[in-house]
Every structure is written in C-alpha cells, then in structure tokens.
Amino acid sequence: MAELKENIMEVEEDTQKGRYLTFSLGKESYGIEIKYVTEIIGIQEITEIPELPEYVKGIINLRGKIIPVMDVRLRFKKEEKEYNDRTCVIVIDVKDVSIGLIVDTVAEVLTIPEEGIVEPPGVSKGFSNRYIKNIGKVGNDVKLILDCEKLLTEDEMEDLNSAL
Amino acid sequence: MKKVLIVDDAAFMRLSLKNILEKNGHQVIGEAENGKVGIMRYRELNPDVVTLDITMPEMDGLTALKEIKKIDNNAKVIIVSAMGQEGFVREAIMYGAKSFIVKPFSEEHVLKVLNSI
Amino acid sequence: MSKLSHEPMLEMFIFETAQLLEQLEQVIINSEKISSYTEHNINEVFRIMHTIKGSSAMMLFNSIASLAHSMEDLFYFIRENKPQKIDFTELTDLILEGADFIQTELVEIENGREATADSCLLIEKIKVFLGDLKKINQISDQSCKNNEKAETIKQQQYYIGSDSFAPIPAKKMFKAVVYFEEGCQMENVRAFTVLHNLKDLVSNLHYFPSNIVEDDSTEEIIRVDGFKVFFSTEYSLEIIREILMDTIFLKHLELEELVGAEELIEFEKNQQAKLRETQSPEIKMIEREQDLEAHSKSLNQSIISVSVSKLDTLMDLVGEMVIAEAMVVQNPDLRGLELDNFQKAARQLNKITSEMQDMVMSIRMVPLSATFHKMHRITRDMCKKLDKEVKLEIIGEETEVDKNIIEHISDPLMHLVRNALDHGIEPTEDRLAKGKPKSGTITIEAKNAGSDVLIIIKDDGKGLDRDGILKRAKENDLLYRSEEDMSDGEVFNLILLPGFSTKESVSEFSGRGVGMDVVSKNIETIGGSVSVDSVQDGGTTITLKIPLTLAIIDGMNIKVGKSRYTIPTASIKESFRPEENDIITDPQGNEMIMVRGECYPILRLHELYNVETKITNFIEGIIIMVEQDTKNLCVFADELLGQQQVVVKTLPDYIRQLKTVKGLAGCTLLGDGSISLILDAGGLFNL
C-alpha cells in the first residue's frame, strides 16, 4: 500500500486525467477519480460522534487534523462488515471538505481511457446507483465510478423521498 | 536592476508598484507610508531610486523630495501623481525629481521611467 | 482551483478601501458633532477620496473611481476656497451617501460579483452641490481656476528677456521640436521637464506653446504639433541631441542649427504680441500647509497588517506545540522514573510555551472600538428616520476580544441598538410627558469579567412589558414553567426563545423581538450567552457574555466507556462521588440529586450519547456539577482523567453541516493522540 500512496503523490495534475483509484466492497468494484484522493491510510481508532447518521462513523486524528469518516458500505445500505487489517480509509477532498471513506480493500490506480467510460444504466439498480457517476470498462472488468460530490452532499431525507 | 524605496500612504499602491518592479527584476528594498518615514528609510537604506507619492499625511511628497535632495543632491526621485496634479509635478521637477508616473499607472510606463533614470 | 492573478491585489484593495471608509465615517460623524469641518478633517476626507480614486482606477472599478474623483474635487474646492456659507448637514449626507455606494460595491466585489452600480446620479448631485456652493459664496470659476493654477514657479526666467535677440557669435542657435509618445500623459509637464533640463546649458530660451504652465490644454497642442524650443548655446549639436534624446517618452526629435536668426525673430515677435494679450496669471507662492495636528490614534501607532490566515496558522501551530509538549512531558515511557533534571527542563519549556501561547492569543485580540463606533452611524441614521433624539455613549471600547469573535458580535450588536432605538426609546413627546430628558441615551459598555467579556447594551427607554411578554409566550406555547413561579428575569429572557415572535402574530408588540432569537443564537455559536433585564419606564438592559478566546481553554477530561470528553473548567462548580441516598427519582423517571439541601437534575452522559460503559451505577462513577449562568446540572460520568489546557478544534465542516449535536462545542486532541469531545454546558442545559 505504501507504493500505492507514492504512486498517487508523484502523479502530476494533468496526467491525473483518466486515472482512478479502485477499491472493492464485497463483490463490487468501485473507482474514484484520482484528483479527489489525498491519501490512503489503514483503519485506525475512530471517535464516535452521537446523533449522526449511522454511516458517519465519527472522526479520526490524522496527524493533528480532525477528519470525519464515512462507512461506504453503510452509505450504500449494504451489510456492515467488521473492520480488519485490510480495511482502508481513503481520504478525499471535495471542494475543501475532507472526509475519509472506509472501504473493504483498496486495489490499484488504473487508467481508464475516455472510450471506456459509459453512462450508468437508467434503471435504478439498487440503492447505490445514485452515487455512481458513470461506468468504467477495463477489459472484462466493470468499475463503478463514484460521484464524490453526491456522496458528500445528498442526505438520507432526499433518498427517502425519492424511494417513495 | 535597481534598488527602490517606495513611499506612498496607500498600501494598495505600494503593493501594485512593488509587484510591477519585482516582476521585472528590480528590488524593492523598503516602503514608507509618509514623507517623514520615507526620509528615515532613505537614510537607512540608501536606495538607487525613490518613488514619492504627492499626497500623503505627515509630510507630503514635495516636502520629502526637498529633504531627500538635501541629504543627497544626486538622489534619483520619481514623483507619483494623479491626473490634475500638473502643478505639483512641475514643482517636483523644479526641485529635482527625475521624472514622474501618473496614476493609474501601467507596467509599461513604470518600467520605461525606471529604466530611463 | 484557478486564481486570478488579480486576487492578492483585490484582497488588498478591499481591505484598504474598507479601512478608509471606516476612517471617513468617523471623520464625518466627528465633524457633525461640532457642526463644522476643521482644516484637518477636510484634508483627511480629501486624502481618503484621493486614495480611493487611485486604487479603484487601478483595479478598473470605474464607477467608484469617478465617484471618488468628484468627491475629491468637492473637498479640494472646500480646502482651497474655504467657503463660508456651507450646509454641513447636506454635505455630510452627500459624503455618507457616497461612502455607502462604495461600501455596497465593495461587498459585491468581495462576494465575487461585478461592481456594476452606476454612480452617475450621485456624481451629478455632488456637482450640483458644488455649483451651488460656488454660487452662494460668489466664487467665480475664473478665480477658482487661478487658484488652482497658481504655482510657485519663478516664471520670469522663461520670459523673453530684454537682453539681446541677436545671437552671440561663439554660441550657436538651435531649433528643436520634441514629439512625445502617444498616451504618455501630461505632455505639457514633460515639455516643462525638457526646459528644466536645458535651462542650465542654454540661453535665450524660447518655446512654443509658451503657456505650458498655466494652460493644460497645451497638452493637446504638444501632442499634435510637438513642442518647439529655440535656444542658443555653446554646446555642440551632438551634445544637445544626446541630452534631448534622454527625454523620457520621446517619440521623435527634430534638431537643427539655425543659420540665421530670422525664424527666431519672427517667432519672437509673435510671442511678444501674444504675451501682451494674455493676462498674467497670479504668481503666488502657495505654501502647502502641512497640518501637523495629531492624527487619530490608529494612524500614529506603528502597525502592520497581517493576513488572518497566517495568524490562524500560527495559532494552530502553537496549539500543536502545546499538545506535543504534553505528549513529551506526560509520556507513558517516563512514568515512574525519577527525573529531576528532566522535570526542571520540562518546567522551563512549559514556561516558554505558555508565554508564547499568551502572546499569540494577544495578537489575535482586537479592541472592540471599531465595532462600537459603527453604532454611531446607525444611531445617527435611525434618529433621523424616527425623528428621535438619542445619544450614544460608549464605555470600555479598548476592551479586547479575539478577532474571530468580533465578527460574530457586530450583527447582534446592531440588532440590539436598532431595537433600543426603535422600540426602547420613546418618542420625544412621550419622554417629556414622563418627565424624562428629551434626549434618550443608549449606553454600550464592555468590560472584562474573569475569562469572559461582558458587553452591556442599556437604554433609558420604556422598558419591557412583562405582562405582554407572558401573554405572547403563552400564545406561542413557550412557557416551561407556571407564570407565578417565574422571576422577572426569567420572564424577560423569554423574548430570546426561538418562536417568540412569529410572523403571524401582529399585536401591540409589532416588531419587538425581531432578531432577538437570532442574536441569541449568534452569541451562543461563539460560546457566549445573552440575558435580558428591564425596569418599567426605566429602560432595558441586555447583557452579552462572551468568552475571551475560542481557542485554548482550561478543561477537565472525563471518561465514559471508551469515549473521552472535556468539560471547560470554568463551567465546573464541583465534582464528587454520589451517595446512594442522595439520589431521588421522580414519578416520570427523572433522576435528581440532593446537594446541600438543593435539588439538581442528573444527566447520564452514557445515555445521552449512547456510549457503552460498565459504570451505570451512580456510586461507581462520578458526578460533575456544571453551572451556566445561575442554573446547575449534574453530569454523570465514569471517572475524571485530569485537568489540562486544551486546544479547541471545531468539528469538521462535514459533520457540522449534517447536524448540530447539542452539547458538543468542538473537540480536542489529548496527549495520547486520542480525540476528546468538548462539552458545552449551555448546550447540555437546553436538552
């Protein structure tokens, strides 16, 4: 994972286009545009904050900076999984808001050319669909590309309303 | 490359001028917010060129010019004026200012004046 | 994120212009008080407008620049001509209108919008005012111009001397025509510079146009036809050429030696004739008066402006240092060791870090004067609007508060002053009828009280209507206690509750209460509190209690299960292990504890925040009695961990956007790197 971290750090802004960090939740594979990722760390002690939605696990101390962490499984209304030493926190920065995403495992940094990016299917395929920006095809694999901004802004109320 | 002392009561003006000068390889070795402080700095820093705004509190540009000339008759002073201050500028020239810059100033003008003295 | 290359300049422009506008307001209001404009003040207004004109022109905010220009002209006129008959109120209104225009545009600019407002109407108004001023004081435009143009130049030396026209044989005669580059501006002054540079080297200097000093329109002539100079000199053509070529912004030079003097003599005759026609302007030496009157305090002090973000970073670093120091000194590795020298050194380190902390805090402290002085303007404007006479008294303006806090006080303060002016102070007739002085008084006072700052806004108006408030509260279902049990203080504080003044209710109350809950909320955001008191027909007093600083507080760390919390020591009254028989449970299941005969509610932290802990039995844990204003609450936790200075960090934006958790004021990092949530006593009470 250290190499992965270095990978991200070395990459320049312009060459970040088309590069995605991929991670998995259960059987599904997701991707995040590299430009949002600031670092990847192992799971660490989380300080709970009461009264928040269950997918917001709390806050962590990242070298003196306090960062909130979100369990992506719970956000996508999947079954919760116990954290182990493979669990990672992907720290992203979206419009000056920092947040750590707790995921099962982090895979690699992939380059997906523009031709490989397609629109997500219109039919609501389960709850996680709204946070998917588009689909990336790499060989036979399909990566669900996350819409980071939606991940951070849309809240449960809206989800409930649309589900009705 | 000239060492310049900027004297103007408006921080904005000082910053504008500083940006232009430094961008073009000159060095701003000091700033002052009125004529009195300007003279002090002149003595301390001994710049190649001094820019003096005309309208300042405590001591205006013309008075400061006269004082600086007393300290060093060869001092190179550029007077910074606004439109409508022709009279003051003429007086400044009489008292030994090498040239003048008119506000609002353009980078081109400033450099031209600076390079010519 | 791309940033405009203009941006640091823009920031500076906004900052400086805002500062200047504040100074301007101050000068204007002071002048109004004494009903006249001192020379010093006129000069200051002139200078402020001059500077704003310059910088806004540089930033291409042309409507602001033109407005500033016309205001500058107005004050230039007043300065130079000292008109006797002048309507000060109208002048003040004009200037304030201008200042408001610029202020509004500044806000637009600050928020990233375009400054598109048109200042033409206002400029017209100012021009009309100036025109009238001239007429009333019978200062004609002619002499006006003369005053403007009269200079110190000893023009004699450029006039045609009575001595010889004929060139002296050893000297040569030259004619030079100087053309300046387009757009170099002030060509007549540049021409003057040419003359100035030549005068020591030549004689018989004649030039055309000759009235470059008096007449600025010669600029145009020089632009088109060039500047013609005739002179005789011993120097060679080459040397003269060299000297003239040195002219800045020179586009083209025509230099030729004159063989005969005909051209010159012809030229001379023309000049002589012309001279006889024109009136010689007044040649006066105008001493530029330098007013050495002491400037306002803010200008005299040696001050530098520092960007707030740098200060914030510095604060953060100092905070980190405090934590790091704790991590070193309280390191578990050192436990149990006898380390005399180490302890000594640690104490020294602590001394230095504490001093640094204090110093950095004090840098961020800003006196309340600026905020308080803004109230003068509001008072003035509202008095005019409401036709009331009110005096604003300010006490303790030098009291300092953290810069972050200042921003949160401004609006509430304005609300309160407005309320006092609008609803507190009675109309003049009523006051006189009651035997009160005609002029009402509003007092704003600031003073230190322990680790807080008290800001008291008091008016001598009609006071609050106790019964009316009770009625309204009942209507809106806000009474939490029976009427008879409520003290006066409690009744008055009802107006701070959200929902107290609802849009539907239009009663005799109309308006009173607008903004009070907003004020309360604003103050609570910075960890402060509001309280209201009143005397019928005597007036109303609103007290804001504000913590001195947001950043570092003395806190007591407590433990609940695996979670850590910190309670500000200032809120803690006492802590103890309860006894079984002190605990009372009422029929509704609310738990309370008896302490020295008084009964206090108990708050189980583990229940409140849903934390797992083995300690649920009171006698196994600890009770911490917290106090807020006069209310007390007993918080139940597992154990006390110790007291320390903690650096308050706000909860991440993401979380604050999601929800405001009641009772949490922020968080802090403990010595072992874990996070402790900071409890806010006030928030706990409101549950």
Image: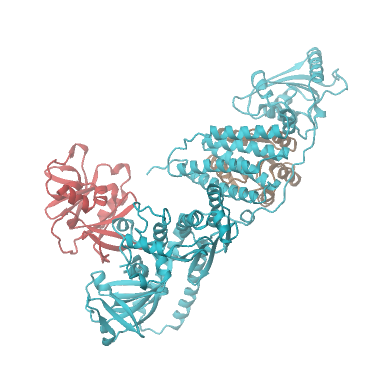
Chain colours: A red, B brown, C cyan
Q: Report the residue that reaches farthest toward the front.
A: C433
Q: Position of residue A87 (x, y in %)?
A: 20, 60
Furthest residue to the right?
Answer: C163
Q: Between C524 and C333, which is closer to the camera in this rendering?
A: C524
Image quarter in which the C terminus of chain C is found = bottom left
Location of residue C482 (image quadrant): bottom left
Q: Is residue C325 above or below residue A144?
A: below
Horizontal side of residue C549 vs C216, given as left or right:
left
Q: In the figure, C528 relative to C218: above or below?
A: below
Residue C377 percent location from the top left of the image: 55, 50
Q: Foreground residue, C307 or C47?
A: C47
At 13% across and 59% down in the image, what residue appears? A79
The image quarter containing residue A58 is bottom left
Assign the N terminus of chain C to one quadrant of the image. top left
Left or right of residue C392, residue C506 in this image: left
Q: Is residue C677 visible?
A: no
- Left or right of residue A71, residue C540 in this image: right
Q: Is residue C214 above or below residue C292?
A: above
Answer whether residue C630 is visible to the viewer in this image: yes
Residue A16 image point, x, y percent: 29, 44
Residue C124 horizontal/vertical position (percent): 58, 32
Question: In front here: C394 or C184?
Answer: C394
Would you say C344 lies left or right of C24 here? left
